[in-house]
């Protein structure tokens, strides 16, 4: 019985330990090249259709063991439609059971979104009316780090920055960024047009193209966690952050949103920058208003569950959200989306998905539009 498993493509990650029969396939997830993080997997499996049982032997040593609880793996026959398959975590092993309907199927931790897809999307967006393509710099492997500017800049306008994929394994960030950009160029979307009347919006759809291409979970080609490099980025270890921050210094920032995924918490939530030295009542009111607006806009967002709030003056200033808030005295937030389903609005079978990431992005634009004039 012939079985072939490969991850020899962009964002691929798997190590095959044994694949003699479909009912007992043994696998390991590979760690980031120069760091010990691992949880992201993505591979193609060819075998006769029918039941496949895949056991991830090193799941207990993954970066976030709690992420496996109540998690269901993603699968696709065509790399377009991704669906959830039965998955359980027991005795330190992740076990995926799938009754395959065809000989070839792809499996992933979440629906993949490659660096090449981001390049194509950026080029397509740049052809739209009112959009400027802004090359900012290059990654360590020589891949471009690009921004898209929406709306003409003006002194009176607020400056909003949205970035995604600092952590390469959190592919939901790219689907969020795609939905965000697509909404901004929709001339029939009233709230997007309202936002652009009051703000110039800069979007970086792919912060870490090297990590994405290499199939990493959290780091770039140098083994750097980019979301821990914002206090003092360098050309040697974090040029991706350096080139973005340089542009932010040039044009300014009144609101910053960094799109991520959280392995363990099965809900969408926002982490603010309450622990920075210059936290103020103004920033507190803006953060509270923004979250309340988003709660009203969609049942997919909540603020009851999330990260503990940093005590006053105790924020980790290496993290983008905190570093940007302090540097620009602005509303600065990390948006976390789940790898699992969102408990507040569960959709069994689909779980949290690319479609829902894009819908959340549209809702986020509405919330931004409602507070844009108050940002400064």
Image (spheres, rainbow, N blue to C red):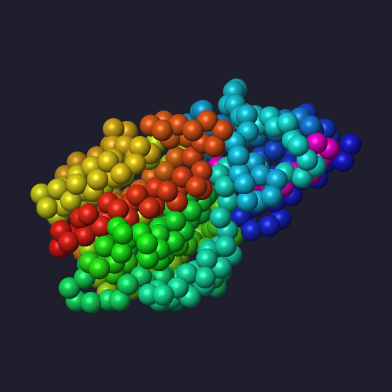
Residue nearest the viewer, comparing 160 with 94 = 160
Nearest the eye: 368 or 256? 368
Residue 127 image position (x, y, % from top left): 48, 75
**Residue nearest the viewer, comparing 33 with 372:** 372
* Numbered range of the magenta stretch: 38-49
Q: Is residue 215 magenta?
A: no
Q: Residue at x 68, y 29 (%)?
A: 97
Residue at x 19% of width, y 76% of height: 155
What residue lies at 46% left-to-right and 58% top-to-bottom? Answer: 178
How many marks do you count on the picture? 0
Residue 161, picture quadrant: bottom left
153 on left or right of 349: left
Residue positioned most to the front: 188
Residue that appears at 22% across and 54% down: 370
Q: Is residue 44 magenta?
A: yes
Residue 221 seen: no
Q: Which quadrant would the C terminus be assigned to in this image? A: bottom left
Q: Nearer the viewer, residue 254 or 9?
A: 254
Q: Is residue 299 visible?
A: yes
- Picture coordinates of residue 260, whole percent (x, y): 42, 49
Expressed as whole percent of the image width and height from the top left, the position of residue 118 reads 53, 63
Q: Is residue 170 above or below residue 373?
A: above
In the rendered view, does 66 fall on the left or right side of 90? left
Q: Quadrant of residue 191?
A: bottom left
Please, is residue 311 above or below residue 191 in the view? Answer: above
């Amino acid at each position: 019985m012939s079985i072939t498993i490969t991850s020899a493509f962009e964002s691929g990650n798997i190590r095959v330990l044994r694949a003699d029969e479909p009912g007992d396939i043994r696998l390991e997830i590979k760690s980031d090249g120069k760091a010990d993080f691992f949880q992201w997997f993505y591979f193609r499996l060819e075998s006769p259709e029918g039941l496949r049982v895949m056991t991830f032997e090193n799941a207990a040593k993954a970066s976030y063991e709690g992420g496996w609880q109540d998690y269901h793996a993603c699968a696709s026959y065509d790399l377009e439609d991704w669906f959830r398959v039965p998955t359980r975590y027991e005795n330190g092993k992740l076990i995926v059971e799938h009754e395959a309907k065809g000989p070839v199927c792809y499996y992933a931790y979440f629906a993949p979104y490659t660096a090449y897809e981001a390049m194509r999307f950026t080029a397509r967006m740049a052809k739209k009316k009112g959009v400027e393509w802004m090359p900012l710099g290059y990654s360590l492997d020589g891949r471009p780090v690009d921004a898209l500017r929406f709306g003409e800049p003006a002194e009176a306008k607020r400056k909003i920055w949205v970035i995604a994929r600092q952590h390469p394994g959190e592919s939901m960030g790219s689907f969020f960024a795609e939905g965000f950009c697509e909404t901004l160029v929709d001339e029939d979307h009233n709230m997007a047009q309202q936002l652009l009347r009051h703000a110039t919006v800069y979007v970086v759809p792919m912060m870490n193209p090297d990590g994405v291409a290499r199939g990493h979970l959290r780091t770039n080609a140098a083994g750097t966690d980019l979301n821990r490099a914002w206090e003092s980025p360098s050309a040697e270890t974090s040029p991706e952050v350096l080139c973005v921050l340089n542009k932010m210094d040039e044009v300014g920032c009144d609101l910053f949103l960094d799109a991520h995924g959280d392995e363990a918490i099965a809900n969408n939530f926002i982490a603010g920058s309450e622990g920075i030295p210059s936290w103020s009542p103004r920033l507190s009111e803006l953060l509270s208003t923004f979250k309340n607006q988003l709660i009203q806009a969609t049942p997919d967002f909540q603020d009851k569950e999330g990260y503990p709030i940093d005590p006053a003056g105790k924020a980790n200033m290496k993290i983008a959200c905190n570093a940007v808030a302090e540097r620009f005295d602005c509303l600065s937030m990390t948006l976390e989306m789940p790898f699992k389903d969102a408990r507040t609005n569960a959709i069994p079978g689909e779980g949290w998905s690319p479609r829902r990431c894009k819908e959340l992005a549209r809702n986020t634009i509405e919330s931004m539009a409602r507070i844009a004039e108050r940002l400064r």
